[in-house]
Image: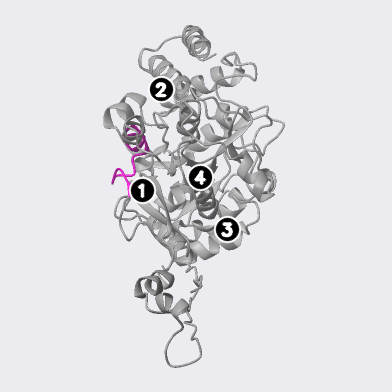
Amino acid sequence: MKKPALWLASLLLTFSVTACSGGGNTPAASDKGAAADPAATSQANTPAEKEKIKFYTFKSNKPEEPAYQAVQAYNQSQDQVEVEYISLVQNSDSTEFLKKLDVLVAGGEVVDAFMTGNEEELMERASRGVVEPLNSYFEAEGVKPEDEYFKVLKLDGKIYGLMGSATQWFTVFNKKYLDEAGLSLPEMGWTWDDFRDYAKKLTTPDHFGTYFHTWGEYANIIAYTEHPNPQLSADLKPIFEDPSFRYFFNLRRAMEKEDKSAEPYADVLASNYHVLQQFFAGKASMLAVPSYAVRAGLNLEKFPHDFQMVYAPLPRSVNATDVGMTNISGGGLAIGAKSEHKQAAYDFIRWMTKESYKYTQEIPALKNVDGKALLEQFFSGNKNLIDTDSLAKTLFDSRNKMPEGTFTVPYGSQLKTIVENSFASYMLDNRKFDDVKAEMTAEVEKVVAANR
């Protein structure tokens, strides 16, 4: 499938130098030096050197890489700025990339623009003072960012990054298995109890009804979609007393131990699967997952499969009154605090948020795009693999929204690890939830206190 082309014309400014004559065939004495100076003429005809900025990324440095193509398109559209594309890893591992970037920055490397794989990675670096706040740049541009983007990446009221694409959690189904079970796609408002029932009906001797990965989100997806922060209240207190934690921990155990509808957690840990591996291998019928699963489903070399993906919203809490709450997230595009080209770097990351999706075929974080038309444009040639109707209905339902007061803390990755480890102990050691909850609470309190 051809990617949409970005046709931008560059302007060529031509300078001419005219030598003035004194009236005869011989130049006047006062004009002779200027007329006879070839160096001056050459300098006048030489275009000004472009301002160069360095962009550090975990995307590969290959012509077929969509992010690389987007940056080259930006360069072609500019006559005064040139972006150097610097890839520190070739496996798209954002964690490994940031470790290398941190070493470079600590060694004195000046970074103009860079990307992170998620919001927490950016906020952690913003808290260390290595990221430039963007508020003043938006003010100078006369733009209110919340009017243009579904979400901007903030810490303590300062904007530190923009999302190049927006990721939203949903449920993806193997249509073949859904049809074989005689089930229809669930509608917005279905609950996690319904999810459990679907998983039972979708389980056969050959495949499980669903799959849960090892990430902290899968210990309690409700905390990520229906709370402002998945571990903390607004006053930075642990929220593990919230009924959703006991409910989801128990749900995970029951689906594995009683229903046999989810692959055992111990096997998942031992196998070190990719989060999408079992679904595309036909070993799981449905999956609650971020929306990057859509584009991944076109990578048949990595995930060979021939079934069509169909989509539904995430389930909600059984007693949820607002059925449209979801989690919108994404990696950050940011500016280095020590950059000497901050305005050029700002202009570049703004362009990336508004134009790079034409190359990456990822859903932008922009509010002013026609989502359904965009999906048709991206995937019209792949409808054997992607059902664009159910995808558009899921991603662009007008009821979708983030919880009020959503916030991030720079030590969020530490809190997430605490929950991951506690959930592992709950599942593997068959511990009581109240004992695990007490440990999680104490550990989170320690981290919060250390960061005050």
Q: What residue sits 56% from the left and 61% below the top?
A: 374
In the foreground, 157 or 279:
157
Marks 2, 3: nearer the viewer: 3
Question: From where the camera sits, is residue 16 visible?
Answer: yes
What kind of element bears circle 3?
helix
* The disc label shown at residue 342, or none: 4
Q: What residue sits 34% from the left and 44% below the top?
A: 92
Residues at discs 3 and 1 in contact (Cβ within 8 Å)? no
Residues at discs 4 and 3 in contact (Cβ within 8 Å)? no
Alpha carbons under labels 1 and 2: distance apart: 40 Å
Q: In which quarter of the image is residue 83?
A: bottom left
Alpha carbons under labels 1 and 4: distance apart: 22 Å
Rendered-image quadrant of the N terminus = bottom left
- Single out the residue that lies furthest toward the bottom: 25
The way the protein has been coloured in the rendering is one colour
In the foreground, 315 or 149:
149
Marks 1, 4: nearer the viewer: 4
Q: What residue sits 57% from the left and 54% below the top?
A: 390
Marks 3, 1: nearer the viewer: 1
Alpha carbons under labels 2 and 4: distance apart: 55 Å
Alpha carbons under labels 2 and 3: distance apart: 36 Å
Question: From where the camera sits, is residue 385 visible?
Answer: no
Tell me the residue that label 3 is attached to.
389
Q: How crowded is mark 4: few (under 14 residues within 10 Å), some or many (20 or more)?
A: many
Q: Please state the horizontal and vertical placement of residue 302, each as a whole percent of the image.
A: 30, 50
Tell me the residue that label 2 is attached to.
257
Query: Residues in magenta?
Result: 86-99
Tell which circle, 1 or 4, labels the residue nearer the N-terminal end.
Answer: 1
Three-letter amino acid code of the residue under disc 2: Lys
Tell me the residue that label 1 is attached to.
59
